[in-house]
Image (cartoon, helix red, strand yellow):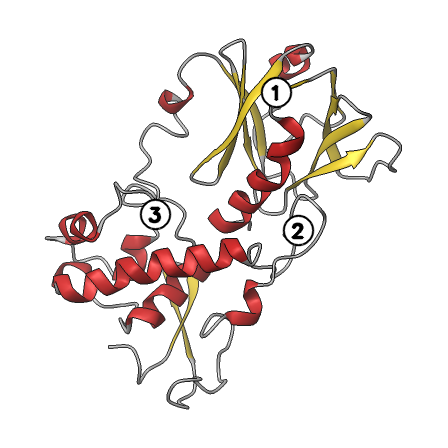
Amino acid sequence: MPELPEVETTCRGISPFLTNKTISRVDVREERLRWPVSPEICSATGLVITQVRRRAKYIILDTQSGGHILIHLGMSGSLRICGADSDIRKHDHVIFHLPDELELRYHDPRRFGCILWVEGNVESHPLLKDLGPEPLSEEFSADYLYASTRGRNTAIKLHIMNNHHVVGVGNIYACESLFMSGIHPTRSAGRISKSRLTKLHQAIQTVLERSITQGGTTLRDFVNSDGQPGYFKQQLEVYDREGEPCRQCGAAIKRIVLGQRSTFYCPKCQR
């Protein structure tokens, strides 16, 4: 599933081709996504896209009408800028026609994503209104992380993956951040000291920034807006390395299931 770095990479890739550009036509080839494609999407013809931005794992296309196109890539979705003469693939479900014979194509083999039209304040939409702070924002500080954990018995990995506390720290990046900060994924969030949570806060931001720089993490389906994979997988220290030696101490990387997700950690480096 595309996580925050992959979505951020996509936003940065498509933004130069969309900002201040007019949508000349929208073709909905398959409306049956996680939720049906909003019928208003087809009425976006003639609208100018004023900004491309991200909130959590949602991509938002603001338009000059005050309406917004809200996109989620689901489990296997991707957005690509293509020439109008490029072959349309089987799972290219929605196509936005742009100036200069270009198209923005939404590709989603599993159809778990969504493309919705939102009027007015998009931040108040039910999918967005209860989300926590962005992990790379000033709002997500070490003090905030510490305060959010007080009185919590939840495992720290589940805490930082909860979008009500902070958005976008998916399974891969949670595992990597906890390894970098030396914290065991099952440790009770409320029992971790402020100094250790400060290290975790720094690790979360470092891991996410590195992944964005590398274009995300390709494990199965993700490709960026140019059709190229992300390369952060080459830097993974624990994720998907069960049984392999830890690069710091040599101990075998362990895997457990936590919150129905595979969790990877070093039994010696993390406590």
Q: Nearer the viewer, residue 29 or 9?
A: 9
Helix, strand or loop for disc 2: loop
Q: Tags 3 and 2 in contact by the CB under 8 Å rule?
A: no
The earlier-in-sequence mark between 1 and 3 is 1
Q: CA distance from mark 3 to mark 2?
A: 22 Å
Whether residue 192 is visible, yes or no, is no
Residue at (42% x, 21% y) in the render: 122
The earlier-in-sequence mark between 3 and 2 is 3
Q: Tags 1 and 3 in contact by the CB under 8 Å rule?
A: no
- Residue linked to disc 1: 20
| Amino acid at circle 1 | Asn
Q: Residue 178, labelled with which disc?
A: none
The quadrant in which the C terminus is found is bottom left
| Amino acid at circle 3 | Pro
Vertical relation: 231 (above or below) 37:
below
- Residue linked to disc 2: 223
Helix, strand or loop for disc 3: loop
Q: Residue 246 location in percent, x, y?
A: 43, 84
**Disc 2 residue crowd, few under 14, some 14–19, many 20+, Cα 10 Å:** many
Q: Residue 258 location in percent, x, y?
A: 36, 63
Q: CA distance from mark 1 to mark 2?
A: 25 Å
